Image (cartoon, grey):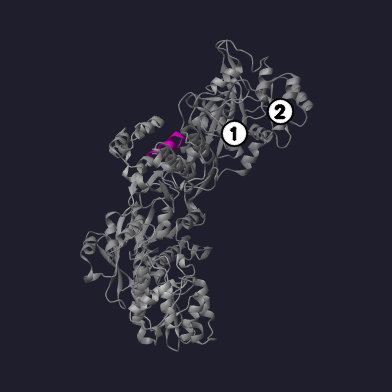
Amino acid sequence: MRVLERAVYRGPHLFGPTPMIRVQLDLGPLEDRPTDKLPGLTERLLELLPSLHNHACSLGHAGGFVERLREGTWLGHVTEHVAIELQSLAGVPVTLGKTRSVKGRNGVYNVLYAYKEPEVGLLAGRLALELVDSLLPDEFRGVRGLDILSKERTETPFALGPALEMLKRLERRTGLGPTTGSIVAEAERRGIPVMRLDDASLVQLGWGAKQQRIRASITGRTSFIGVETASDKDLTKAILTRAGVPAPEGVVVRRAEDAVREAMRMGGPVVVKPLDGNHGRGVTINLTQPDDIRRAFDVAVTESKRGRVIVEQFFEGNDHRLLVVGGELVAVAERVPAHVVGDGQSTIRQLVEVVNLDPRRGEGHEQVLTKIKLDAAVDSYLAARGLTLDSVPKAGEQVYLRGTANLSTGGTAVDRTDEIHPDNACIAIRAALSLGLDVAGIDFICPDISKSARECGGGVVEVNAAPGFRMHLQPTVGRPRPVAPAVVRMLFPKGETGRIPIFAVTGTNGKSTTARMLAHILRQTGLTVGLTNTSGVYVNSERVLKADASGPRSARMVLHDPMVEAAVFEVARGGLLREGLAFDECDVGAVTNVQADHLGLKGIETVQDLAWVKGVVVENVRRRGVSVLNADDVLTARMRRRAGGRIAFFSMRGGREMSGFLREHVEDGGLAVVLEGDLGGGEIVVHDQGRRRLLMRAAEIPATLGGLAQFNVANALTAAAMAIGHGTSLQAVRLALATFGTAFEQNPGRLNIFDGHGFRVIMDYAHNPAGLIALRDLLTKLRPNHGRLIGMVTVPGDRRDEDIREMGEIAAMTYDELVLREDPSRRGRAEGEIIELMAQGARRGGADERRIHRVADEMRAAEACMAMARAGDLVVLTPTEVEDMWRCVLQFRPTARPDELLQPPARSTIEAETRTLPRRQNGRSGSQPHA
């Protein structure tokens, strides 16, 4: 077997809406060996992983997968289920998976399975393959390409135990803790978006301007002053006392003798603890003897960052943690210190070992309980009671190991939420509010939590910022308390989802201009708009990142931005195939068109394949959202069957030319934005709920050049349909479109016009045959007012040979003079190969060699085009580096003769180069020249 590639889908993708990992696996000769033809494999697999009996698989009932194994299924499908089960055994409960054969590639499968953390999921995939491989006959052993998934190394030969422990360690290192995890789970349950911001526990809930942040139980609203105050135990007590909260008397000391003196003055049992400690470290309770107080001081001072120790009055009673969230008491737990119960035979050390075998106990906070650790604090506590770790308690005797009851030191928890006295609840709430904490853990000592501490004694001994939720979520005894909803409810009151409106635009051509038009419309309504496209990431008019930003990473950048109130995303094919969408669902999705482009890449071989990819955007429109589709494009219009939300159409053929299904849609009250009448004098009309309303004349939109630029009329229809579908008024749309032109500053690289050299220059990103044909339609209308048409032509090198030739053929039918150049990266093509393929197409389109000029460098090609131009000519430049080329246009001065820039090679040289060029088909060797 061999791993060919992998992808981590973080949002909806081609195979479904759930984040998944995809492993493309080539079974090789094992394609002819399903599980029923591999004797003993099923039995050995089930012996290793008996829990696979619970997998329903496609049969829909427990045991379904085992039935498939025995009937005969392929090893890609087996790998899927094993990867899921390994994650479950490591404490990551995932269930979803699917395996699909790759069209046209025998024995190659896409194996997909859900994950929580990418690193854990990828390692699970590697371990699954290693496990399956270990069960195969020797002649089939060996999996190549495993490092694509994870570089973690397992034992040889494969052993399940160590492999599973490796996976668990990685989960502990990368997974969220119980407190953060519970809040994230509640946010997801409420439909609030979640984005992890680091490798620890910093998490963003919500998007853009609606976001809130948490780190464990610290929220973005948690007062820094409150946290600082809570960390100073002496100041905390002073504030609590002023607020009428019962709290122990205490004094801060720096020396052991001062601790003894203050304890004697108080005249009763005392507690000695670090002034700024946490998790119960360095705390010793119920001290009366000077020597014990000195020893306790030495322990406490080592845990204090500032070298200060507090000596305070000891409250008799049980230790409780009261959780207050947003001024509401949400849970109460009695904490019992780590302890053992004697059997009359075992030592305390041996009893601890038995207790630690409890599967509920783990390291740190990974499990419900923490393993009991034997350290100097335990030795000291036992010594004060005349015991050592080698003492043998009587049968039934309960021996406490620590004076503090923190779960992090091995304590247990008993839920007491329903038993607390109202007075004690009020005391806890007052304590939290007095310190200014939105989430607080109140350490409360009293003999009986069901009785008022004001009557039976006790009170607040400590207030904790960032309290852990584990004892409430999974108490050792009693009812679990779902405390996370209180935090999420505080951050997002009822009805709030933390979402900003998302508008996603995809399609072969027109995405960038449509997205810019829509962002311009939304800005006119007063919103701060985040925009991503091939030029960069923008927040209103500010470009915050210069890059091709049409993928999911750039979209997530916008969703992180705390200023953004609405997001407009250009969604390109590449990022969607690589990672999926950056969001779980959008409010408005649009597909402009689907044309032959990027075929032969990443398994997308046909226009129908490409349409399926583009359709992912509208498939993930929310139920109350809007899907905007091109009614004039057959493949796009068909997406209405799988699109989400309300369907809206745009069309260049309205009025009497309206197609049958579109007319039916309009008559049924559907939303449609259409062009009625001739292009120059055509009107943009909105049909909705049976009403027909005029939006504006197409010629009133500057970007359409008086209605002549048909592609920009279509882009305006798309943007208008998206905005109106979301609820933007017609007036706002009309005013915005009337101020959207072709200026470089407003829409760089898209129909930018410059008339300052005595001839006209148009700069436009016509990078595929459909785009060049649309541009040719405009140039045909403009030609009567100009002399010659001089055009630069290029195409990315990862397109098919025939697509590159077609660009040359269309250019030959468009321009009087052609300057062929190469994309700077060439994307795997040999130097000169792209130019020569275009030249072949140009000759096929009727151009003779005198009209074909070859200039590989982009800026030199632009200068050559302009140098050839005479007064009244029209020069068309197609940029890769948009800003550099526009600067070249503005700064052009005719200093060189055109022939010096062009320098075409001799015909014999061209023919020789053609014969020696690598022959390619779809980016692979083996093609034949066009006949």
Residue 307 visible? The answer is yes
The one nearer the camera, 40 or 214, is: 40
Which residue was labeled with disc 2? Answer: 299
* Quarter of the figure with the C terminus: bottom left
> Residue 293's quadrant in the figure?
top right
Tell me the mark number nearer the camera, choosing from 2 and 1: 2
Q: Please state which amino acid type lies under the numbered disc 2.
A: Val
- Residue position for label 1: 431
The span shown in magenta is 81-93
x then y, percent, for residue 638:
27, 59
- Percent from the top left, x then y, of residue 652? 29, 70
**Eyeballing the image, is 372 above or below 582?**
above
* Residue type (three-letter) at the residue carrying disc 1: Ala
Badge 2 marks a residue whose secondary structure is helix
In front here: 899 or 696?
899
Please provide percent x and percent y for residue 622: 35, 51
Q: Which residue is drawn at 41% across and 78% down?
A: 911
- Of residues 427 and 503, the one nearer the viewer is 503
Disc 1 is placed on an element classified as helix
**Please, what is the dominant secondary structure of the magenta stretch?**
helix
Q: Is residue 750 visible?
A: no
Label drawn at residue 758: none
Within 10 angstroms of label 2, few (less than 14), some, or many (20 or more) residues? many
Q: Is residue 90 covered in magenta? A: yes
Give the Cα separation between the discs numbered 2 and 1.
Answer: 28 Å
Q: Residue at (38%, 55%) from the top-left corner? A: 587
